Amino acid sequence: MNILIMTIPVAITLVVFFVLAYLSAVKNEQFDDLETPAHIPFSDDEFPTIEEQKTRRQ
Amino acid sequence: MDSSLVPIKYEFSVEGMHCVSCVRKIQDVAGNFSNLTDLKVDFSRNQVSTLASEDFDPKGFMEIVQSLGFDIRLLSRGDTQKNSLIRNRHQLSRIGVAGACAGNIMLLSFANYLGAASTEFAKPFDWIGATLFLPIITFCAWPIIKNSAISVFKRRISVDTPIALAVVLGSSLSYYNLLRDTGEVYFDSISMFVFFILGSRYLVMRVQDKHLNPVAVSDVLQTQLIKVIRKGKEQQISSEKVQIGDVVVIGPNKYVPVDGKLLDAASEVDNSIFSGESLPTLLFKWDPVFAGMKTLKEIKIQASKRVDESRIHELVRMLNRSLLERTPLTTLTDKGAHWLTICVVILAIGYFFLAQHFGGVDIINRLLALLVIACPCALAIASPLALSLGIKKALKKSILIKDPSSLEKIKDCDCIIFDKTGTLTDGKIDIISWSPRNPTSEENKILFSIENGSEHPIAKAFLRFVGHQKEIPYNLKREIPGYGVEISTNDYSYRLSRLDSESGQVGFFKDDKLLLKANISDRSNTESKELIQELTRWGKKIFLLSGDTAQASKKIGNDLGLNPSHVYSRKSPEEKMSIVKELMKKHKVLYVGDGINDILAMGEADISISTRSAAQTTFKISSIHLLGSHLRPILDVFKISNKCVSTIQINIVLSSIYNLSFAVMALSGWINPFVAIVLMPLSSLSVTGFTLFKLNQRETA
């Protein structure tokens, strides 16, 4: 059972890593709008870059 | 990183600040409010802006400032879209962290349940679980704990109270047990529980779009450039800068910016903002004109009040006051939680003393098990779910439910008040019939020539009736406000004029000889009639409240088969409000309206529905908004409300039975943490499943 001494820290490191990745995704506005991005490929117009969207939002 | 700490910006306008010491006085008020994070006094603009957490009570703040001798008004509550985005992000972070931690705690504790408990790993596993639990209590569940602490402080028990009680007591006793190496730990069940609750609340937050912004006059009256004559000099100024005594020239089809007196000999203005009346009002020289009225032709008025003292501002002020004074509704869930908490606490205390007296074993642990298990998770999860499903369902029928609690309340409304113009009728005047015969095509041309180019609603009705025609040549066109229009050709003179001011009849004269009579009216649609019949069948009392003439209201009332004593006409916005107040003494009142003249009444009523044609302000204050052009969805609102409430009620009963029987089991020592972790999701799942089943059922018939 000594293997647990290794697997548990590894598991916890993974959890921390994924939680941090998730939190940074939330912070980077990944989940703010779940609708619109899905429609962008269907639009004939050039879709705005993230910078343009940001300025537009302001 | 706490959502209730995401500051909300409030702006107040403060009158009566004269010096720096006044500024100091107001700044000192901030000391009384721990939930105020920032307070800025803008001396030059007479404004105070604050940043505060969600639980900040602007009314209390205003009262204190008022007691210092200042006149303070709430300008805006900046719960802007940006803030709601930030709240959304915080909520998501909490759910993610809770999910990750709960999942891993669960893995470890299941290892313990499945045999690790008797090995040397038991302790380390518990310790790792306890560490993973730390973010749950300090980050994920923190807003719940904080809110319930606040509500207990205010002597209110909300659904948060028992949840917070279970989370706080459960975790602290678990830590105590872990440190002392005695008894059981409940990290797994509490963390799962927090995760479920956060998830279900997030769902509700997503579907509801709640805006509590106070109404601003700018929603009603837009600032515009306007021509004024001040001290003999003509100038263009912004409409908000008009001063008393200025002569204001207002072009056709514009809103009057300020209260004043008419300088023209006579003119007709559209007064529907105050009266809801479909026909314009005739005013003579020196008659009062109010800001918000709409002109038909260019008029000249002399401003007699300051812009911000106009009647429309007074109206909006009254409205905001009554909205602030509205007591928040106690929801069914809160009531259920209240009752359950009291039961559990009595049970716990009773057990504690009995056990002390008779000498029980393991008292603390059993009490802990009781608290964890008796948590009203079913209430906390299933009721929001029921409401959010109801809101979604309503949206499919093009009903926007802005205030979810209205879904619980509307079912009890037994008295429904309809505004006439724009709600039951579409507010447009039409020619209903001609007597003794319809006009010939030659006469149509003459009618077109008479009315062409006019903004008058009656003229528009004629133009709609005759369609586009060729104008006949004529020499002279004369318009007499409130009376009619006359044109003369080489051979004859033709005239269209109202036969009397009350009835909706217009005469067509040729050389002063009456040729034809046209009956005009705004009509109720057949749909309204069916709706009202159905509502009456359900035992609702229907009232009609109109600012229009007695005759027009009576006619619509008759068309719809209403009790004549339930039809009120010629009511000002203030009178409408007092009628609603009177009715609310005996009934639960639902108000359906669309115009500015309804806002006071709608702010007062238990529930208000705004229709598609609603003005922005009316939309803002209504609790339910109809997106489609039909009124029929009102019936659906009632149906959905009935369904939601019955689902919630059954849920409350179910979960009470669960919780109380679990409580008995816990106290008699049958429940250990493992049983708790199985039973808790089971009870939540059953109510959730029931809710989904009940509200997703296809409607029969």
Image (cartoon, rainbow, N blue to C red):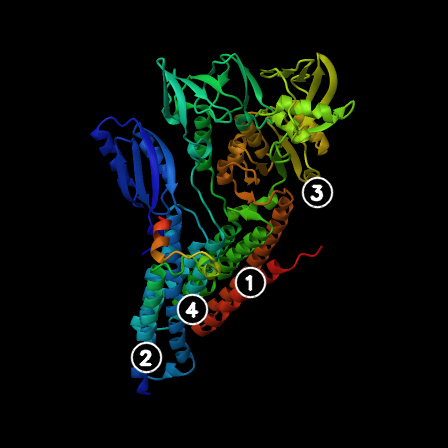
Circles 3 and 4 on the same chain: yes
Question: In which quadrant is the C terminus of chain B drawn?
Answer: bottom right
Reading the image, the residue beneath label 2 is A8
| Of labels 3 and 4, the one closer to you | 3
- The CA distance from mark 3 to mark 4 is 49 Å
The amino acid type found where label 2 is placed reads Ile
Relative depth, front residue between B60 and B546: B546
Residue neighbourhood size for the residue with mark 4, other residues' Cα within 10 Å, grouped as few (<14), some (14–19), many (≥20): many
- The percent position of residue B262, horizontal first and vertical second, equals 48, 15
The subunit carrying tag 1 is B
Left or right: B670 as drawn, with respect to B638: left
The subunit carrying tag 3 is B
Reading the image, the residue beneath label 1 is B687
Residue found at x 74% / y 20%: B516
| Of labels 2 and 1, the one closer to you | 2
Q: Quadrant of residue B316?
A: top left
Question: In which quadrant is the N terminus of chain B drawn?
Answer: bottom left
Circles 4 and 2 on the same chain: no
Q: Quadrant of residue A12?
A: bottom left
Tell me the tag on residue B189: 4
- The CA distance from mark 4 to mark 2 is 21 Å
Contact (Cβ within 8 Å) of mark 4 with mark 1: no
The amino acid type found where label 1 is placed reads Val
Reading the image, the residue beneath label 3 is B534
- Whether B559 is drawn above or below B687: the answer is above
- The percent position of residue B82, horizontal first and vertical second, equals 37, 49
Relative depth, front residue between B689 and B397: B397
- The CA distance from mark 2 to mark 1 is 36 Å
Which mark is first along the chain, 4 or 3? 4
- The percent position of residue B562, horizontal first and vertical second, equals 70, 32
